[in-house]
Image: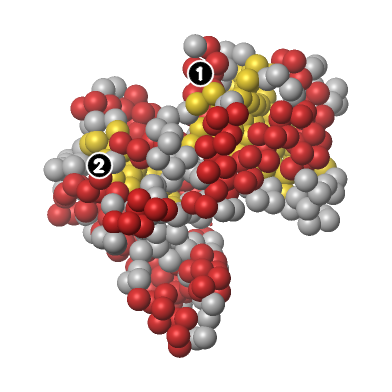
């Protein structure tokens, strides 16, 4: 059974075609800069990369072009689109309506539309992907997999904000959390690696990428997470600020004469590690500057490690202890010094890192010492595989 996974952003989309008989990726790619006049597709098959320039104005045309490459005899991926059994769509926001993945029908599309105010950039892009598939491969079953669904197990005292209750009732202002597919994949995978039943484990997963969130996974379910109403909250990120004193927003509006949109842009695009260091949003550059003695680069990294460790400590409290800490995504998988720096703050929990084991990038591995009271692992995430597995399960029912 072959499943196509689509992840649509506002001006880009990523895809993977996965053979679910052996979970092998047959082809994958990214279409960038849709509607910007210089769009191109990077199509990868068997480790070979093909960059195909093809300006398109819409997701429909971009998806149409990508699908043509899947059947293009030059790349020998599939002979016909009929071989695609189903499409799994990553949808960012499912609000309170979806606590698991669902088969897409008119009702589901309507509900995704209703969640647009909660994710004004992301949900419309997901809908464009669904519409494009309805036109290009009509009749193929489709599944929606929501970033928010995994966190619907949080208790109300964890997700409610201390604001007038009417905003929760009127607009659904509450903590939702994101990266649910990654948190679910990593927690299940680490339980498998340990040969333990996930129902016996308290796991804290650190998904540290451009966007970053932590999740406390208690006995297999999301118990708490760092992102909130939107993916701006929680730990500091590459360019996003994470949690702040909320008065900073009105302070900037008054003192810098900024509009709400301008403040939003600063908090999303100019803050976090980039904002403090002034160097770059990329941790590789900031680490290099830190080694050159750049004080602000050093400060940005210290602040990052302190905040991540702070949330890990809070979640350990929330679950009455922690058995496993996992690191995943670009930074979590690759930044040796960041993992070490975060864990240095966690000695009080009995966390002890094995420096030799930690000296690795993007590999599934235990990186804590034998004596460490909490096990620490690197587990490369695989959101696409998780989406494909959910899709397979739903269409097989
Ligand atoms: P993601 O959003 O998961 O792709 O993570 C992106 C971030 O991960 C980048 O900004 C880098 O800081 C970091 N990163 C990605 N690859 C590497 C690598 N090979 N070595 C060190 N850091 C990396």
Q: Residue at x 57, y 27 (%)?
A: 104
How far apart are the two marked residues, 2 and 1, measured between alpha carbons? Answer: 27 Å
Residue 96 as seen in the image, left or right of residue 18: left
**Mark 2 lies on residue:** 155
| 338 lies above or below 360 | below
| 24 lies above or below 35 | above
Q: Residues within 10 Å of mark 1 (few under 14, many from 20)?
A: some
Indicate the position of residue 254 as horizontal and vertical percent values: 45, 85
Q: Residue at x 35, y 76 (%)?
A: 247
Q: Residues within 10 Å of mark 2 (few under 14, many from 20)?
A: few
- The N terminus lies in quadrant: top right
Q: Secondary structure at mark 1?
A: helix
Residue 210 as seen in the image, left or right of residue 18: left
Q: Is residue 261 visible?
A: yes
Q: Nearer the viewer, residue 305 or 148?
A: 148
Q: Residue at x 75, y 24 (%)?
A: 137
**Mark 1 lies on residue:** 394
Q: Is residue 335 visible?
A: no
Residue 71 as seen in the image, left or right of residue 374: right
Residue 229 as seen in the image, left or right of residue 306: right
| 310 lies above or below 184 | below
Q: Residue at x 53, y 43 (%)?
A: 114
Q: Quadrant of residue 187?
A: top left
């Amino acid at each position: 059974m072959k499943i196509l996974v689509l992840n649509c952003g506002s001006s880009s989309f990523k895809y993977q075609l996965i053979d679910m008989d052996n979970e092998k990726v047959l082809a994958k790619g990214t279409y960038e800069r849709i509607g910007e006049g210089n769009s191109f597709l990077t199509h990868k098959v068997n480790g070979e990369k093909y960059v195909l320039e093809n300006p398109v104005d819409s997701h429909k045309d971009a998806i149409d072009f990508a699908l043509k490459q899947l059947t293009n005899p030059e790349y020998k991926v599939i002979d016909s689109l009929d071989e695609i059994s189903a499409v799994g769509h990553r949808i960012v926001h499912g609000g309170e309506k979806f606590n698991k993945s669902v088969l897409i029908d008119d009702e589901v599309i309507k509900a995704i539309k209703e969640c647009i105010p909660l994710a004004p950039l992301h949900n419309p892009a997901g809908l464009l992907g669904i519409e494009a598939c309805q036109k290009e491969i009509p009749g193929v079953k489709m599944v929606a997999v929501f970033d928010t669904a995994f966190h619907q197990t949080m208790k109300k005292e964890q997700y409610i904000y201390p604001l007038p209750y009417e905003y929760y009732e009127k607009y659904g202002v509450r903590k939702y959390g994101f990266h649910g597919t990654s948190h679910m994949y990593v927690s299940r995978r680490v339980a498998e690696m340990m040969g333990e039943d996930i129902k016996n484990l308290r796991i804290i997963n650190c998904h540290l990428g451009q966007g970053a969130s932590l999740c406390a996974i208690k006995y297999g379910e999301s118990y708490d997470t760092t992102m909130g109403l939107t993916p701006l909250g929680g730990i500091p990120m590459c360019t996003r600020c994470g949690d702040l004193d909320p008065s900073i927003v009105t302070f900037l509006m008054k003192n810098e004469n900024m509009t709400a949109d301008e403040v939003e842009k600063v908090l999303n695009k100019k803050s976090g590690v980039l904002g403090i260091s002034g160097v770059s949003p990329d941790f590789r550059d900031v680490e290099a500057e830190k080694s050159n003695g750049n004080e602000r680069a050093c400060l940005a990294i210290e602040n990052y490690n302190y905040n991540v460790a702070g949330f890990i400590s809070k979640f350990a409290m929330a679950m009455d202890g922690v058995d496993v800490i996992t690191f995943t995504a670009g930074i979590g998988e690759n930044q040796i010094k960041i993992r070490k720096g975060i864990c240095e703050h966690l000695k009080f929990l009995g966390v002890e890192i094995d420096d030799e084991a930690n000296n690795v990038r993007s590999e599934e591995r235990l990186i804590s010492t034998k004596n460490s009271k909490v096990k620490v692992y690197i587990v490369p995430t695989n959101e696409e595989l998780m989406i494909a597995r959910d899709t397979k399960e739903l269409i097989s029912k």
